[in-house]
Image: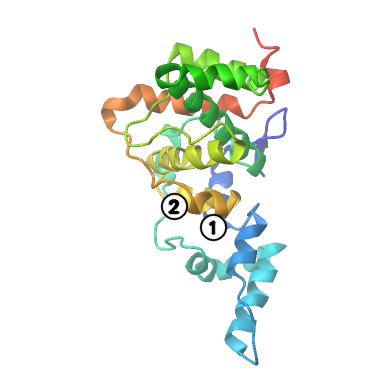
């Protein structure tokens, strides 16, 4: 149903893709969401047992689950009353890679640029250590350094990543990605976040505001999101 890029990243295509994301948000969910939501059954509590059976069904979903959309939304904090904003499709940033691997790579790409931007401005020693330790002497980090030198990524209201580890970079980037998604298509992030590790989201900051005056920052972040999903070996071959 969804258009696929050459590297396998799912991208938003026609209205059918958006309808599927909206009304079948259980597609491609991170399994940890089900593990956390599944109740621990003790005794003969029929209600808990029923909840667990439904959650197990959503682990391997079929079209027959669509009538349970509202129940699912209630379980995972989605506003089922929000209408599908198809009228905003024409203004959405394209392409928009959103399958789980693409979201993960985009978060790492955004986090790397933000971390290097912080190091360039406030901690040259950390930057030197990053590359001296060998971690930075890789294509993704060198690309992050190039982008940070051209335009630092330092959103107002969002401090720098707490470090250069993958988990720290993801935790920093996910709130920014959530803000971009919801500003472009209200309600999208409550669905897309289910494709990410919930432990990272729990430790993340609230979604930061991006004022209209920061249009350049918004364009920069979207550009990193879209191009950051491409494997570095492919990106390095581009002119």
- Does residue 75 lie above or below 96 as drawn? below
From the top left corner, tell me how far across and down residue 110 is, in percent.
Answer: 52, 30
Q: Identify the image quadrant of the N terminus.
A: top right
Which residue sits at x=64%, y=65%? 35
Residue 187, image x, y percentages: 43, 51
Q: Quadrant of residue 47?
A: bottom right
Q: Nearer the viewer, residue 223 or 209?
A: 209
Q: Residue at the spot x=56%, y=16% of the render? A: 128
Q: Give residue 52's position: percent from left, percent from top.
A: 64, 76
- The residue most toward the bottom is 44
Name the quarter where the C terminus is drawn: top right
Tags 2 and 1 in contact by the CB under 8 Å rule? yes
Assign a secondary structure to mark 1: helix
Question: Residue 104, how many percent across, how many down?
Answer: 61, 39
Q: Earlier in the sequence, mark 2 or mark 1?
A: 1
In the displayed structure image, the side of residue 13 where residue 232 appears, left or right? right
Residue 178 located left or right of residue 29: left
Report which residue position mark 1 lands on. 23
Give the left or right position of residue 95, taking residue 160 as reference. right
Residue 175 vs 128, above or below: the answer is: below
Q: Which residue is mark 2?
A: 84
Q: Which mark is residue 151?
A: none
Structural distance between the alpha carbons of marks 2 and 1: 9 Å
Where disc 2 sits, the SS reads loop
Q: Is residue 62 left or right of 125 when viewed as pictured?
A: right
- Quarter of the image where one finds residue 90: top left
* Residue 226 visible: yes
């Amino acid at each position: 149903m969804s258009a696929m890029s050459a590297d396998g990243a799912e991208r938003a295509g026609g209205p059918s893709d958006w309808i599927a994301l909206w009304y079948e948000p259980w597609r491609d969910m991170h399994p940890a969401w089900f593990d956390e939501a599944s109740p621990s059954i003790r005794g003969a509590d029929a209600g808990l047992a029923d909840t667990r059976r439904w959650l197990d069904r959503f682990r391997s979903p079929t079209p027959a689950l669509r009538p349970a959309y509202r129940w699912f939304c209630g379980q995972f904090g989605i506003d089922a009353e929000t209408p599908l904003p198809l009228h905003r499709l024409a203004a959405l940033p394209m392409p928009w890679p959103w399958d789980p691997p693409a979201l993960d790579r985009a978060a790492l790409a955004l986090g790397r640029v933000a971390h290097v931007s912080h190091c360039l401005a406030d901690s040259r020693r950390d930057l030197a250590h990053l590359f001296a330790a060998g971690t930075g002497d890789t294509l993704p980090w060198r690309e992050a350094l190039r982008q940070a030198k051209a335009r630092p990524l330092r959103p107002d209201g969002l401090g720098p990543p707490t470090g250069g580890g993958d988990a720290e970079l993801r935790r920093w980037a996910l709130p920014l990605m959530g803000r971009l998604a919801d500003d472009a298509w209200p309600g999208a992030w409550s669905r897309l976040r289910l494709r990410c590790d919930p432990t990272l989201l729990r430790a993340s900051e609230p979604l930061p505001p991006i004022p209209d005056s920061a249009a350049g920052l918004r364009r920069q972040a979207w550009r990193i999101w879209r191009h950051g999903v491409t494997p570095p070996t492919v990106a390095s071959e581009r002119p």
